[in-house]
Image (cartoon, rainbow, N blue to C red):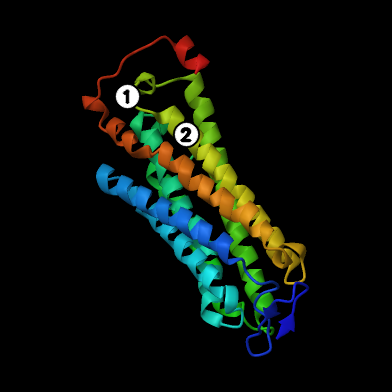
Amino acid sequence: MAILARGDVLESHDGYYLWNYIPSEPAAGIFAALFLIATAAHGYKVWTTKAKFCYAFTIGCFLEFVGYCARASAHNKTGKLMPYIIQNFFILVSPALFAASIYMTLGRIIRSIGAEKYSVIRVNWLTKTFVCGDILSFMVQGGSAGLMFSASTVKMGEAMVVGGLFIQIVMFGLFALTAVIFQSRLRKNPTPASYSADIPWKQSLHMLYAVSALIMVRSIFRVVEYLMGQGGYPLKHEWTLYIFDSVLMFAVTVIFYFRYPNELERGVDRDSANVQMVPQEVYSKV
């Protein structure tokens, strides 16, 4: 065991220190409570709206909750392996589940206003392409979980985490580019359904930009964190995790909740939609 500057005792696991500090129980408890609320709120939304493509997002909220519960329990168990693995794995991979629902939302936006011809990738392949990349990112990051608790394998585990996060960053970058090109093409030649006040596609698209940016920032932070390694500043100072991961991911759950994309389903059946036509100048001002 090691004695920290404040007199706290840091326990080791078979001679290897899983933590560089004593994890804060109050901070982890606060975010466990916040993500429990997010899980309940999104669970209620997905149940009442029947937006099945948002199930992954709700599961992501739940994994965040479990992760922070495990982190809180590690406060006086820094030598215990299971709390460390659970919190490390669940907090790390939860955004990949958020991303799955985010990717599926773009395809629904495009279909809701009959703008399939403006998508860089065929809409039938759009969701599959990004979700497959997301699954790959999830699997690579998840595979690192069993390698992060031994001095002999921690470097390999860190490399796998960085690789998975790079995949996530690349996929989000391509996703954002796809969305921007789509919106640019649509702005030049709006479809009739894009004028409908009943389809909140613009709000949903802006929501996608916001949550994608937050997840991108978080992923970049995580890459820097693991590239710097166990001796780096981020892994030695707990506040960096809460500012650049916890706060950002909770913000993602709040934004997604208040701009929930369930109403996009209305526009998928465009033949029955009552579309109100307005001049193009109105669109350009929105």
Image coordinates of residue 13 in percent, x first then y, are 63, 86
Compared to residue 15, the image places residue 10 above or below, namely above
Image coordinates of residue 146 in percent, x first then y, are 55, 79
Compared to residue 239, the image places residue 126 above or below, namely above
Question: Which kind of residue does numbered mark 1 sit on?
Answer: Asp
Q: Earlier in the sequence, mark 1 or mark 2?
A: 1
* Quarter the N terminus occupies: bottom right
In depth, the one of 89 and 116 nearer the eye is 89
Residue that sits furthest to the front in the current view: 7
- Residue 72 visible (yes or no): yes
Q: Secondary structure at mark 2?
A: helix
Q: Residue at x 67, y 55 (%)?
A: 221
Q: Residue at x 45, y 28 (%)?
A: 202
Gap between marks 1 and 2 measured at Cα: 15 Å
Question: Which kind of residue does numbered mark 2 sit on?
Answer: Leu
Image coordinates of residue 228 in percent, x first then y, are 75, 65
Q: Is residue 6 left or right of residue 108?
A: right
In depth, the one of 170 and 34 nearer the eye is 34
Q: Residue at x 69, y 65 (%)?
A: 226
**Residue to which mark 1 is pinned:** 198
Image coordinates of residue 224 in percent, x first then y, are 71, 59
| Numbered tag placed on residue 205 in the rendering | 2
Q: Secondary structure at mark 1?
A: loop
